[in-house]
Amino acid sequence: MENKDSSKISRGDLLKGIVKKGGLMMLGGLPWAAYVEENKEEEFVLRPPGAVDEKKFVESCIKCGICVEECPYDTLKLAKPGDDALTGTPFFTPRDIPCYMCTDIPCVEACPTDSLLKDLVSDDNNDKYDINKAEMGVAVIDRKNCLAYWGIRCDACYRACPLLDEAIVLNFERNKRTGKHAMMKPEVNADICTGCGMCEHACITEKASIFVLPREKALGKVNDDYIKGWDEEDESRLDSNNIYIDKNQVEKSTLDYLNDTGSLLNDE
Amino acid sequence: MMSNLSKYRYLILRRIVQITILVLFWGANRYGWKVLVGNLSTAKVLDSFYLADPLAVLQILATGTIISLDILIGVLIIVIFYGLITGRSFCSWVCPINIVTDSAAWLRKKGYGEKGNKYLKLPKSMRYYVLGLALILSLVLGVAAYEVINPIGITVREIVFGFGISATVLILIFLFDLFVLKNGFCGHICPVGGFYSLISKFRLLKVHLENDKCTSCMDCKTVCPEVQVLGIVGKKSGDISQGACTNCGRCIEVCEDDALRFKFF
Ligand code: SF4
Ligand code: SF4
Ligand code: SF4
Ligand code: SF4
Ligand code: SF4
């Protein structure tokens, strides 16, 4: 392109050159593409509050790190190559530093790209921040190693939770082994838990027995065949998901099926 | 001594600018300074407006994402500043990678590196293909593809957010430039430099040659990282107008005959 005698190159040669170089680049693009693909498929990453869904997030975050700088607790880090998040994007590791759920949410306030979206962490009128709306993840309890499930008294996570008695509740049960003690088993309410990770941070076992996972990883999903008929909100799933059965099509295909005697008579 | 110093006047100034910018970013993270917050991909200036890397934003747009007005204005400022005023000066006055590649070029000139590009020949235009590919991959993969491997971003983040400089990328680039290809990374591969080359053709600030003074010593050509732009040296007076010139001013300061100078307009 910056070749001095480019004027002497015929158009055909130029075209050939472009095709050749383009081809070479495509070849070089393969490992590049593979690396990018592999780097962006980190599925267990926890994002700051208000983050749009992961697929959108890796598209739109410009990796400026302003959220990181605004966070007063140094919760957020920008991923470096080798971290479990797309290089350059912010994430947090609650076992090291959880999100302390600032009520003024400075990280969200500062994001210039709407990758952290105010609407997702505001009250219903969208005029005041409500950090309790955050869905960074959801805490999951490993009942095998949680000491409270052994019958040992520990409520570290319960007390650490900023939504105490809402996001984590303690279920009292008789300790059948001793016959005279109570068990106080923590249980997470996934509808309320924000995934801040203060519980994970506080857990006293060597490796945390309560930990935050991305909601898509930790939670199942029920299709519209099952609706809580007693719950108005759940019933609204029917409208919003736009279940529309085209009767004509169904009848037609059923009739077709019944009329299709050909396959019955056909012995092959 | 004085004359010696004046032979490096732009170089020294450039290093000061490059390092100051990094220090300001670093201080923003460390002490909450508000002059430049963020990093070279997007920065908030004086708590009032943004600057944004046009290539990073192009890649984001290629993924099909709508970008906020703040950022678009930031891109516009950058494009006008470099494209219409100071040219590809991002490379020589701002980008920290330039310190590394300049050092490699300097050692090469001293005779330490490999001589004469025996191992690899790449066309200078390669960076435009990398740029094109970056956009295509962003479109296909749904993530700003070059930003994942961009050594500028990786390095600046390491310095500013203080995960310590792992330096792997820097060392690779250094060795590549020293032993494999002269001006290898910045002159052939980096699509950021490529992007600024593409938009800088009509800049106001240019190096100007007065050929009457030129003794054809070719000192300028030994220091220039983009030698091909100095085609007119020893031939005819005029502006160094190709976009690839980084306005580093090295040619000006090494010229013993005062034949080169910066010219505005
Ligand atoms: S809400 Fe506060 S603690 Fe949590 S990430 Fe944002 S700034 Fe940090
Ligand atoms: S402030 Fe927004 S765009 Fe910048 S790194 Fe954080 S999430 Fe990404
Ligand atoms: S992550 Fe843990 S501490 Fe935070 S809201 Fe959920 S249960 Fe409570
Ligand atoms: S070519 Fe790229 S790496 Fe080199 S100085 Fe310019 S922007 Fe920086
Ligand atoms: S022509 Fe001069 S100013 Fe331009 S890149 Fe070469 S040495 Fe630097």
Image (spheres, coloured by chain):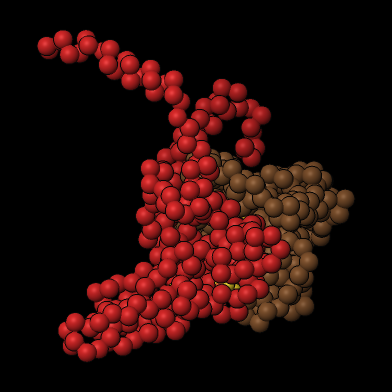
- The reply to whether residue A225 is visible in this rendering is yes
Q: Is residue A262 left or right of residue B4?
A: left
Q: Is residue A160 above or below residue B93?
A: below
Q: What percent of the width, then of the height, locates residue A64?
A: 61, 63
Mark yes or no: residue A63 visible. no
Q: Nearer the viewer, residue A66 or A52?
A: A52
A74 or B171: nearer the viewer = A74
Give the total number of marks visible in the rendering. 0
Query: Residue at horizontal 60%, vertical 46%?
Result: B65
Q: Which chain is brown?
A: B
The image position of residue B20, as x and y in percent, is: 70, 74
- Occupied quadrant, residue B36: bottom right
Vertical side of B59 occupied by A129: above or below: below
The quadrant of the rendering that contains the N terminus of chain A is top right
Which residue, as the protein is rendered here, is positioned at the far right? B265
Looking at the image, which residue is at 38% across and 20% down? A251
- For the point 54% across and 32% down, the residue is A18
Task: Report the residue that reaches farthest toward the left.
Answer: A267
Residue A97 locus on image (x, y percent)? 48, 78
Quadrant (top left/top right/bottom left/bottom right) for the C terminus of chain A: top left
Asked if residue B142 lies left or right of residue A115, the reply is left
Which chain identifier belongs to the red chain?
A
Q: Is residue A245 above or below residue A255?
A: below
Q: Residue at x 37, y 61 (%)?
A: A218
Q: Position of residue A22 (x, y in %)?
A: 50, 35
Which quarter of the picture shows residue A265? top left
